[in-house]
Amino acid sequence: MTAERTSLEASAWPPLREELRGIAPYGAPQLDVPVQLNVNENPYGPSAEVVADIAASVAEAAVDLNRYPDREFTDLRTALADYLNTDGGLGLTADQLWAANGSNEVMLQLLQAFGGPGRTALSFAPTYSMYPEYARDAMTNWVVGRRETDFSLDLDAARELIREHRPHVVLLPSPNNPTGTALPPEAVSMLCEAAATDDHSGIVVVDEAYGEFRRAGTPSALELLPQHRNLVVSRTMSKAFALAGARLGYFAASPEICNAVRVVRLPYHLSAVTQATALAALRHAPELLGRVDDLRRERDETVGWLREQGLRVAETDANFALFGTFEDRHAVWQGLLDRGVLIRETGPDGWLRVSIGTPGEMTTFKNALTEVMKAGS
């Protein structure tokens, strides 16, 4: 074996797909600091009563862990439909719901079913950084348009981009991550109509991971499901439900879309433990969602305070705020970290994102940012 051949084989190990070589895995920094405000978690954990119900439900499920779980998770789909019908849904039924291990798996399944080689997915930047990775993993062409300077959509430009590229999947977070911008209903309807023409069919996925945090008067895209058969509205139990560790994401759509996704799901993809945990949490929905109003108030107070410091802040319907702009945002991020506060360095150049925490955590953040800004002035 020649030295040249040995070198070539070594450089090709392991035999990874070429387009994946050199790419770092996705992930926000996981650092042990006193105040962690970087991944949009709910800072309020479940109560002792909720924990006890989850534990009892999991214990009951554990008796039959030698058997595979209900692969259609019918009880959970029914409970999710009942919940959504209290928050924008209009008569949703179990056959219009689908769930998976977090919104990440939901999105990947949608792209596996409706994307793929020779097909296109489309979104508008800045937006969630995982979307192009979902497309890549499903071998789907990725097209990205641009948002306006206030992070809204130019609807005419969006329509033209869809007409030009004829995507099979359009991904639209509302509220948007990392900006917090919500989509008005007329925008969702227009994009659904643009994505489905006489000679082309595409689905529009409105990702409402932060939907429960939207401001009063901001409707959910769930209300539009009866009007658009190509609309999918996704949610998660990671944020408002304070169940990030449980990994349960789901979507509402037509029965035909739900059935299509069943083709690409892995066998028994939702464990019995996950199903039991989610069902127990849904039984306590009013309590678990009880802190949402507190987080909305804290968010609005934080936005007001940031603006009082002379900073720009994007309008937000989520449990985070995107703020800036800074000549050296990394220096600001590092300065906060040095003071025990971890936020997210994400979004357009010069911007930073802070998750909304408890009042005490937000006070610590404000004090630290004041110090950092004074040190840099």
Image (cartoon, rainbow, N blue to C red):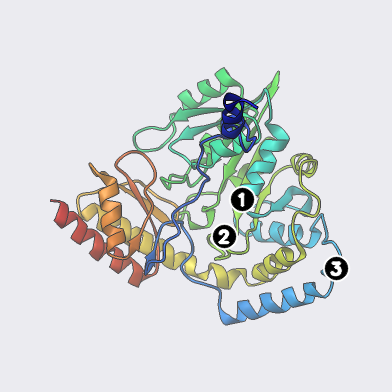
Q: CA distance from mark 2 to mark 3?
A: 28 Å
Which image quadrant is residue 19 in? Answer: top right
Q: Is residue 177 left or right of residue 205?
A: left
Q: Earlier in the sequence, mark 3 or mark 1?
A: 3
Q: Amino acid at mark 2?
A: Ser
Q: CA distance from mark 3 to mark 1?
A: 27 Å
Looking at the image, residue 371 lies above or below residue 143: below
Looking at the image, residue 50 lies above or below residue 233: below
Task: Name the residue: 78% across, 43% down.
Answer: 255
- Answer yes or no: do the residues labelled 2 and 1 have beta carbons within 8 Å? yes
Which image quadrant is residue 363 in? Answer: bottom left
Task: Identify the mark at residue 263; answer none if there is no mark.
Answer: none
Task: Name the residue: 70% across, 53% down.
Answer: 99
Which residue corresponds to mark 1? 103
Q: Is residue 279 left or right of residue 31?
A: right
Q: Is residue 282 visible?
A: yes
Task: Name the residue: 58% across, 70% down.
Answer: 286
Task: Name the residue: 61% across, 68% down.
Answer: 285
Which residue corresponds to mark 2? 238
Residue 69: horizontal and vertical position, in percent?
82, 62
Q: Amino acid at mark 3?
A: Asn
Front residue of this view, candidates 40 and 181: 40
Residue 166: horizontal and vertical position, in percent?
61, 22
| Discs 3/1, front | 3
Which residue corresponds to mark 3? 66
Considering every residue shown, the one lying at the far right of the view is 67
Residue 59: horizontal and vertical position, in percent?
75, 77
Circle 2: element type: loop
